[in-house]
Amino acid sequence: MTGSTERRFNHPMKKMPKLAVWKFTSCDGCQLSLLDCEDELLLLAEQIDIAYFMEASSRQIDGPYDLSIVEGSITTTDEAERIQQIRQQSQILITIGACASSGGIQALRNFADVKEFTSLIYAKPEYIATLKTSSAISDHVQVDFVLQGCPINKTQLLEVLSAYLNQRKPQIPAHSVCMECKLRGNICVMVAHGTPCMGPVTHAGCGAICPAYNRGCYGCFGPKENPNSASLSHWWQTELGSDKATLLENFRNMNAAAPAFATQSLKFIEADHEKK
Amino acid sequence: MKARSATSFILPSDKLNSLIHSLQQAGYQVVGPVIVDQAIIYDQIKSADDLPQGWTDEQEAGRYRLKRRQDAAYFGFNVGPNSWKKYLQLPRRQVWQAHKTADGIEIEPVNAAITPLAFLGVRSCELHAIAIQDRVFLSGEYHNEDYKQRRQSIFTVAVNCTQAAATCFCTSMNTGPAVSLPCDLEITEIINDNEHYFLLRSGSEKGQLILQQLPVTPATSAHQQQEKTAINQAEKQMSVGPRVFDSSDLQALLYRNYENPLWSDIAQRCLSCANCTMVCPTCFCSSVEDTTDLSGDHAERWEQWDSCFTADFSYIHGGSVRPDTRSRYRQWMTHKLATWHEQFNTSGCVGCGRCIAWCPVGIDITEEIVRFQESDTP
């Protein structure tokens, strides 16, 4: 977390802060993580005024809001305008999930021609008003904290909310999934089984669920800080015998447009073109 | 190899359970090698049936595979992803909790009940690793009380290595393969065409008390010769292997090569994923996290393994001191092999090879040392 974010978290709180939860292009799964906090939801409602949360209640209190939680990516011009308004109304803005933090699975369009495939799918493609790309919220407005994951981990969401309410830094480490594996006692699936695993380049947060069940991490929490996608890919290809499809499947997933993954997947395509 | 003064005894291999049961009766929970998810790790042992009998580990840089052995050896493998540090410096533990009171906060220490553990199958390199962690946590002005209590209650059954994995380099670090530090019991497993037995020696009063309860017979000089031959075999395997190097001048070498472009070359491959530090039996760094619940009335402090390969590790006001992989790998290797000497009067490396095998992209610390030696201009 940056120094400026810490400052913004340390606001004086006299009355109950107002919370708004916003949806952009997304599946709603991350918002659901908040509703999934069943045991803590009442406690949360005692600490924060849930002023706008359409998935939970039709009650809508006007802004400004102390805290906005934003789910989803920007895929239309309307959304691009709406996020500006939300930013203006929000003292703190937190994004949740892969869509909001890197464009989500729908950012696969960024690697293709939107016009071409809308014309193939829709009877009247002229009705489709969509941008050429799906982009992260941080590409449009300043974001105070990014909580990665597809979907996010609800315990981490509660940690971020607790940190906000208690004016402290959230404990959301940006290191690899590998550290979670080792802390949990998982056996490394790459080293011991030869299974391609995204863990070494993926942001911690899930608790290393997939390797705990003997499958490779598929990177749903997006890139960790300082990832080395090139070295990992090289090892998969040369030592584990991974083919291009395996590499693309893993790097073009729900975090396909995250720069560390996108740069790498474009290299696979380029390498393919060179061969031809 | 050190002189073996203590009297040696013979325990037939089918009586190994007597050792495990004697330890259990003495109040120890026995922990030792078991197979989980195609790797040999350390976990609770109820009887000799839990041990990886007839299995061995094939290790190379970034690669670990279990293989069936031709014989029924109980300790016919080397080291896996676990080290004993997981029982002494817990991966994650709560340090204290606090509650808001009418006139402030009340802090309560969290003292977990400590079960005395018997470590069955400690390799010589691992005894050295424990001794290094002892210096870190128990010497000097500040002690880690949790480590101290766990450490005091353990019983060590050390095993002489009679074979070496391809990743082993204890001979280069002078930590093995023969048990060369004190332990409670020292055993060597001998298998030949018509015999399978353990040679036992006690190394402490606690060890003597256990040994007295076992169905052992005195060892002959022939038995001791067999032991010597078996341990020599491990030494020989390492001496002809690719991971032999001269470790006598590593401090000066690394200080001279602080700006060597090789660091950038390593950084091209290194994932900064922290696996090497997690599997290292001497890496001791931990982070301390304070958390609150939603109400803010309850707070907790947790300690967990940390790594110099993360950005948070060197984060101070304004940013991370070591933002890139080059500086992180250099910090790790230079600390491990050089500055550790100044800090703790010992190398931080015991030559167990875990960091080599469990690096997901096979970065080999011994290979890198040799590259520094070759490109060095003193």
Image (cartoon, grey):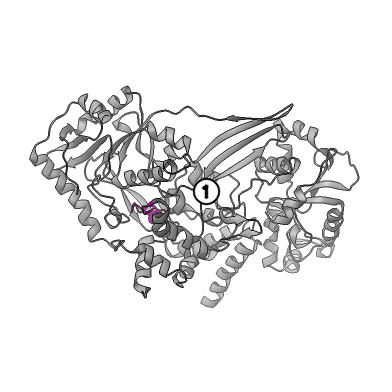
| Residue at the disc numbered 1 | B306
Q: Chain of mark 1?
A: B
Amino acid at pointer 1: Asp
Picture coordinates of residue B71 (x, y %)?
21, 43
Identify which residue is drawn at 55% across, 57% down.
A201
* Residue furthest out toward the right: A62
Quadrant of image for the C terminus of chain B: bottom left
Q: Is residue B347 magenta?
A: yes
Q: Which residues are magenta?
A: B345-358
Q: Is residue A208 left or right of residue B19?
A: right
Q: Position of residue B130 (x, y in %)?
A: 37, 43
Residue B263 position in % (x across, y down): 46, 68
Chief secondary structure of the magenta span?
A: loop
At x 43%, y 65%, the residue is: A238
Is any part of residue A47 visible from this angle?
yes
Foreground: B224 or B285?
B285
